[in-house]
Image (cartoon, rainbow, N blue to C red):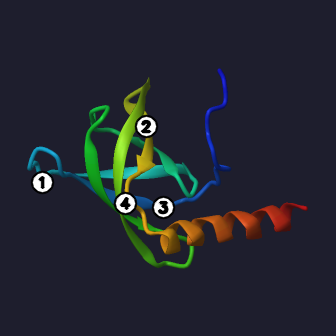
Amino acid sequence: MEERRKSNRIELISTLVVKRLDNGTDREAQIEIVDVSKTGIGFSCNELLEIGAVYEAFLRIWTQEVIHSFLEIVRIEKKGPSYNYGAVFIGMPEMDASRIEVYDTVESLKKS
């Protein structure tokens, strides 16, 4: 499969709650983050979400801060009883994207 990511992906163990915005549904789903970059996120969830749907998310990062963001689902893959998703951040402030990028830099230096 061809790599299409524009930014490095980093692992981040966390959970967050997503809430669909584009159709007024306020059902919440717990997800587990697989990886994250300053432009997007990979996660797994037991609930079926829709490609193209926009969800509100509260991402708890390694500093225990919460980043409020919006996600658009761009990829879905069924894995056993759950689904793996790829999503891009929509309208994330540069300050929040920079927090993720700084973490990636620090982790890369640790591995060197």
- Residue 13, position in %: x, y? 55, 59
* Amino acid type indicated by mark 2: Tyr
Q: Earlier in the sequence, mark 1 or mark 4?
A: 4
Question: Quadrant where the C terminus lies?
Answer: bottom right
Q: Residue 16 — which label? A: 4
Label 3: which secondary element: loop
Residues marked 2 and 4 touching at CB (< 8 Å): no
Residues marked 1 and 2 touching at CB (< 8 Å): no
Residues marked 3 and 4 touching at CB (< 8 Å): yes
Residue assigned mark 2: 85
Question: Mark 3: few, some, or many residues within 10 Å (few <14, many ≥20)?
Answer: some
Residue assigned mark 3: 14
Q: Nearer the viewer, residue 110 or 97?
A: 97
Residue assigned mark 1: 26
As drawn, 18 above or below 65: above
* Amino acid type indicated by mark 4: Leu
Q: Is residue 62 left or right of residue 59?
A: right
Where is residue 105, by image quadrant? bottom right
Q: Earlier in the sequence, mark 1 or mark 2?
A: 1
